[in-house]
Image: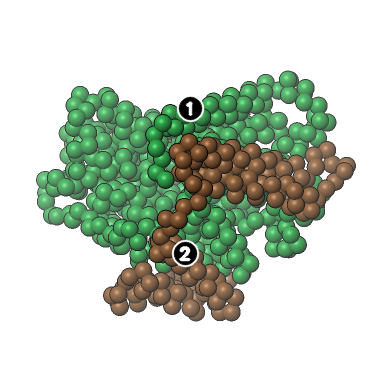
Amino acid sequence: MPRSDFWSGLAVAAFGLLALLWMIPNYAGSNPFAQMPPELVPGIGAWLMVICGGIIAVKGLVQLLRERLTLVTTELSWAAIGWAAWPFVYVGVAIWFMSFIKITWFGAFLIAGMLILLGERRWYMILGCSVVPVVLLYVLSVYMMRVGVV
Amino acid sequence: MDFSAVGSAAAEALTLASFIGIGGGVLLGYVVGVIPGLSRSVAISIAIPMTFYMSPYIAISFLIGLSKGTAAGSAVSAILLNAPGEASSAATALDGYPMAKQGKPKTALQIGLIASVMGDILATIILIFVAIPFARVALMFGPYEMAAILAFALVFIAGLSGGNIFKGLAAGGLGIFLGTVGLDNQTGLPRLTFGYTELMDGMPLIAVAIGTLALSEMFVQSEKLRYERGTMSVAIKKDDSDRITWPIFRRILPTILRGTGVGTFVGALPGLGPSVGSFMSYGMAQKAAKDPQAFGKGEPKGIAAAESADNAVIPAALIPLFGLGIPGNVSAALLIGAFAIHGITVGPLLLRDNPELLYSIFAGMILASVIMLALGWFGLMFFAQITRVPPHVVIPVVIFFCLAGMMLQGYGTFGLVILMGFALLGYLMKKYDYSFVTFLVAFIITPMLELNLRQSIILSRGNWEILLGRPIAMFFIVCTVLALVTLIVRTFRTDKAAGGAPTSE
């Protein structure tokens, strides 16, 4: 917990600093005549992240020092990380695919592929679970919402 | 009260379209609630795109019906599987599962259903009688009061929805920051859009909601599959003695009424949520019982206490929403988004500008409760079968609907990339215990907060002394500061107390 607190707090504070020093000055716009400048509210959000992220990181660091733990650990399970990461990669690739082909046309393969990767082997389950949602989407988009095939 | 508006609202609630819309919402909610791992907020976020073609009344009632359905449905998996569909039904499992194992699954389910429906209907009636006077008072509030109340709600939610106030505030800060993306209302200039015209209207709410709630949850669930696979549910057998009887109902009735009171109180406070309500009610029922040792071993009062409070929270959480326009939890925050999609400003203005719609929604909520009772009673065997659907089948289907929901919104690949970004953010927030509830509520209320803050600054010409003449605003500013100080002190004290014990790393 203290190690993850330290790193997550640091990440939040770093993002807050990035927002304060680069994003807000360059992209929040400004209006010298406005009684409330447009950068005020995003600035409040960024300051909250810097202060609270900093406190979380410092508390985590103090706890780490107290318990004589290192900042990084070598006890990483790559298999566990791989298992956690593959759905992101799978969906990421699907999104890339969707820039070329509509989800209705390849949705069944998207679901079936993931079902197989998650361990489903019964053909009737794979067929039913992959086709029925796509048909429902088709009915919803074409006949009920009338936005055409998505 | 405008009785002609009430009459037309009741007539609208009894139309076929209303029955289909609300019934569909309750049914979908029930199915989602029964499946462990699919929560209310996941269901609402995925269902919002489905409501685009509905009328505002049907759309909102559909979503509220769905919300109610998940609360009732989650009891089924809690009782039959010992795996609550919602965290708030964990208290139901404490007595529901032992009772089911003792050969009384149907009795346990019927107790849960009756407690759910009674808690829900009573809290809806309280909502109707409280929200309208509340909204009438709120109509007298100016921007000073609204800005102060919104700030107070945000701090309250940050402190209570997670364990650590700093993590809650950091998540709130990110929500505020991202909530300001888009065209600035005053200058009309793009703000934090980084040159992307797609962001001119702000971060797409559907992408933020589906990403942080639904898609990220599916990633969390798929990760869990490595360590745990599905469990078998308790089967319901044909047994005439396995049903709720009049003496059992009479015994649990006071517990249901107490649970409803607790749930309504907890639901009306922003940030607490149904889990707090159900466990608080369970604890109170145990304390009040003549035989507290029976709790945890299949005591009907335990199921009744947890379920009545859990379901009472749902309508009660709409009191600050309809009264002040402030979402008390994620579901209410998502409803604000759904209202906005249909061009309606929720809050006290709804009572002034569109009272027919408000009364129609109330009528729809009562109808949803009745449909919930009928569906739960007659569909018991069907819902019991759904508990057997394994999570590895649910995950790909939900991911598909998440992606399809974005495409229906019309954002294209850009929206999908934003969705993926928020899914990653939601995953990390859940993993590192940052309150995604606070993040989402902050993201949704920031435009309202900024507008009221801006009006306050313009009206006061930057003179803070004007607040001394606004006692309600001052009261909430003082409450915000006090809440902040109390929560910070509590966090430090908790950490100090835990400091002696070694951590998990």
Within 10 Å of disc 2 (Cα), the crowding (few <14, some 14-19, many 20+) is some
Near-viewer residue (B92 or B261): B92
Same chain check for tags 2 and 1 = no
The structure residue drawn at horizontal position 22% and vertical position 37%, both measured from the top left corner, is B296
Q: Which mark is residue A85?
A: 2
Residue type at the position of mark 2: Ala
How far apart are labels 2 and 1 at the CA level?
37 Å
Percent from the top left, x then y, of residue B365?
A: 44, 45
Q: Residue furthest right?
A: A33
Read off the residue under disc 1: B493
- Does residue B2 appear in the picture of this structure? no
Q: Which mark is residue A19?
A: none
Three-letter amino acid code at the position of disc 1? Arg
> What crowding class fits label 1: few (fewer than 14 Cα within 10 Å), some (14-19), or many (20 or more)?
few
Q: Which chain is green?
A: B
Secondary structure, mark 2, is helix
Whether residue B205 sits left or right of residue B240 in the image: it is: right
Q: Position of residue B320 (x, y in %)?
A: 54, 36
Compared to residue B110, the image places residue B423 above or below, namely below
Name the residue nearer the viewer: A139 or A115: A115
Query: Where, quadrant-wise, is the C terminus of chain B in this rendering?
Result: top left
Chain in brown on the image: A
Seen at 74% across and 59% down, the residue is: B194
